[in-house]
Image (cartoon, rainbow, N blue to C red):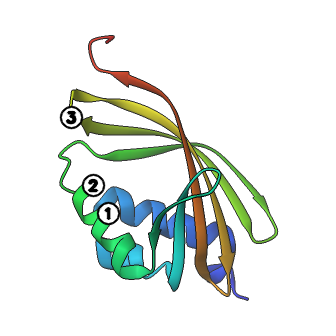
């Protein structure tokens, strides 16, 4: 495994592509049969087509940006704590998330996300 394919490097490329709203680059970091979960076990998307469809909608948000607060790497597991700026149905704001990625052979095989502390701009 090269540094380019290390779990941390793969997840960083995924984060960079997310912030650039580059769907092709982001999907290139996922295995074709990858799965995304809402933590702990609710399947949100299975396979590149479903993951791409979910993210294409998200990428329409004009203020979308994820800021990495902390990263832990242990073997094939990468755990990111992020603050994400979003446009929610009720307005703009932020949400914290913890994303747990399992990276196998240089691709994200699964991702599990837990959201918390949603805050709307203006203190709502």
> Which residue extends farthest top?
123
Q: Is residue 74 visible?
A: yes
Which residue, given by chain and number where applicable, does mark 3 sit on? 89
Which residue, given by chain and number where applicable, does mark 2 sit on? 58
Q: Few, some or many C-alpha atoms within 10 Å of disc 2 (few <14, some 14-19, many ≥20)?
A: some
Could you say whether the residue bearing mark 1 is in a helix, strand or loop? helix
- The answer to whether marks 2 and 1 mark residues whose Cβ atoms lie closer than 8 Å is yes
Q: Cα distance, mark 2 to mark 3? A: 12 Å
Residue at (40%, 77%) from the top-left corner?
27
Residue at (62%, 57%) from the top-left corner?
41
Q: Few, some or many C-alpha atoms within 10 Å of disc 1 (few <14, some 14-19, many ≥20)?
A: some
Q: Is residue 103 left or right of residue 34?
A: right
- Up the image or down, 64 lies above or below 85; here it is below
> Which residue extends farthest front?
42
From the viewer's side, name the closer residue of 122 and 4. Answer: 122
Residue at (28%, 70%) from the top-left corner?
53
Lower position in the chain sequence, tag 1 or tag 3: 1
């Amino acid at each position: 495994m090269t540094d380019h394919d290390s779990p941390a490097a793969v997840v960083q490329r995924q984060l960079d592509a997310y912030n650039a709203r580059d769907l092709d680059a982001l999907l290139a970091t996922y295995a074709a049969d990858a799965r995304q979960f809402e933590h702990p076990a609710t399947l949100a998307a299975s396979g590149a087509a479903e993951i791409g469809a979910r993210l294409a909608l998200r990428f329409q948000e004009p203020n979308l940006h994820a800021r990495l607060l902390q990263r832990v790497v242990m073997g094939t597991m990468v755990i990111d704590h992020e603050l994400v700026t979003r446009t929610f149905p009720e307005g703009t704001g932020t949400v914290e998330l913890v994303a747990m990625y399992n990276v196998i052979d240089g691709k994200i095989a699964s991702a599990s996300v837990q959201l918390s502390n949603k805050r709307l701009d203006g203190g709502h």
